Image: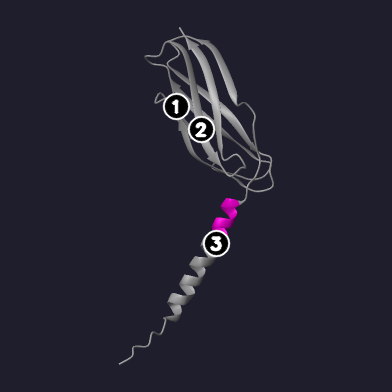
Amino acid sequence: MKIKFIPNPLFLICFSFLVLFVSCLEKKLSQNTRIKIINKTIDLGLLSKSDSLVEVSHIIKNIGEHDLFLSELKTSCGCTGVNIDKNAIKPGDSTFVRLDIDLKDKYGPLGIYTKFVANTKEGYHSLFIKMIIK
């Protein structure tokens, strides 16, 4: 006895749309663009311990021809929270990467890196903040 497989038409339609969606998404994410970081390094200079919380912003601009996608934002210090206005930036547009730094129990020189992934030729990018806490 031979069993004949007859595919469900609804399944075929759904599967086709899924394949189309995934291929379009993959193409969009693979399009590299160019990035300009306006203030890659910020020197806050001398800060007082009484400045318990400091907020700093980096500006990231999309100077390429495709949408810029930012992901995996991580800081080198647990004392720092990171927020971004938007993860997808249109060509010519920009966004702010805001860092909230808790200076509690900090003293002396402090440097904080923020790293992120973007759909650029380089792939990984870093930002840096330095300060001295007295």
User: Which residue is rendered at x = 46% and y = 71% of the image?
Assistant: 15
Q: Residue furthest front?
A: 1
Return the residue at label 2. 115
Q: Are marks 1 and 2 in contact (CB under 8 Å)?
A: yes
Label 1 sits on residue: 76
CB within 8 Å, label 1 to label 3:
no
The three-letter amino acid code for the residue at tag 1 is: Ser
Would residue 71 appear left or right of 8 to someone viewing this image?
A: right
Q: Quadrant of the C terminus?
A: top left
> Position of 72 compared to 4: left or right?
right
Q: Main secondary structure of the magenta part?
A: helix
Q: Is 104 one of the magenta-colored residues?
A: no
Q: Position of residue 50 (x, y in %)?
A: 43, 10
Among numbered discs 1 and 3, the one appearing first in the sequence = 3
Nearer the observer, 40 or 2: 2
Q: Reading the chain from its start, which is encountered first: label 1 or label 2?
A: 1
What secondary structure is marked by label 2?
A: strand
Q: For residue 23, which numbered disc appears in the image?
A: 3
Give the image quarter of residue 107. top left
User: Seen from this angle, which residue lies furthest bottom?
Assistant: 1
